[in-house]
Image: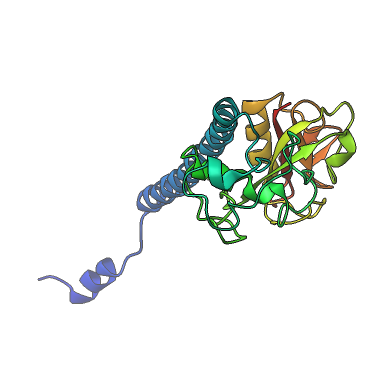
Amino acid sequence: MTNPVSTAKRSQGGFTLVELAIVMIIIGLLIGGVLKGQELINNAQVTATVSQVKSIEAATSTFRDVYSALPGDMLAPTTRLPNCTAAPCNVPGNGDGRLSNTPAQTPVGAEGENFFVHLSAADLLTGIVPGSTSIGGNYPGAKINGVAILAGSATTAANLGGAISTLDASAGLYLVLTDTIGAQSATTLGLKPTEALRIDTKLDDGTAITGTVRARGATCATAGVYATNTAGQTCGLYIRIQG
């Protein structure tokens, strides 16, 4: 005859060590899969942002070839560009071959505000809805972290305000990756050092203080080396696309 007490005791037994080990392995695999998935997403966002920068550079070259003018700086845009009868697109530039705002200055109310609007009117850039001084309005949003892409012209290295180093920085047309549509400083950032490093490496030399890509942010890098052990969004970028 079966002992009911013995049966109850057996049915109330806990997990064996083997079962616990299997559960821990499954949990580890799930965590690893999530982290790997996040890394893949982040890598895809970096690659997409680099493609955006290259597309804007190509669009700017095409615009200059077709209209013999820099977008945003164009004289009489209303008579030269299609779908350019309303503000801010119809506001003429001064035609001096560069944007009136530096990369460190706010583009709002300056030629940098019309840079992307003119590219859009010429059907060379998508993602612009003219009339709003926000991301997705007059300014495109980068594919990473929703940061803004701004534009400005530098005539001297000092025009890269807030950059970690401006030594040997070249004059030219710059794009700015930033979390603020306005004047740039060491506190208007938006990128993690790992993200800034990957973008810099794909576009330039991977060093925060040299080349055509210059980093901003007091704790973004040390001696030109991106502080990739930092998880915060402590970096912004100046990216020179044309002379």
In the image shown, does 60 or 183 lie closer to the viewer?
Answer: 60
Asked if residue 148 is positioned above or below residue 43 in the image, the reply reads below
Q: How many marks?
A: 0
What is the residue that sits farthest to the bottom in this orientation? 5
Of the pair 171 and 9, the residue shown nearer to us? 171
Identify the residue at horizontal 79%, vertical 44% (top origin). 102
Say above or below: 134 vs 124: below
For the N terminus, the image quarter is bottom left
Q: What residue appears at the point 42 percent right and 44 percent down from the top-left corner?
A: 29
Q: Give the side of residue 123 with respect to residue 200, left or right.
A: left
The answer to whether residue 229 is visible is: no
Is 182 placed left or right of 79 in the picture? right
Image quadrant assignment for residue 37: top left
Position of residue 215 in the picture relative to residue 8 (left or right): right
On the rendered structure, is 197 left or right of 217? left
| Residue 124: image location, x then y, percent | 49, 37
Residue reaching furthest left? Answer: 1
Picture coordinates of residue 6 (x, y %)?
24, 70
Which of the two residues, 57 or 96, is positioned nearer the viewer here? 96
For the residue pair 236 and 94, the one nearer the viewer reads as 94
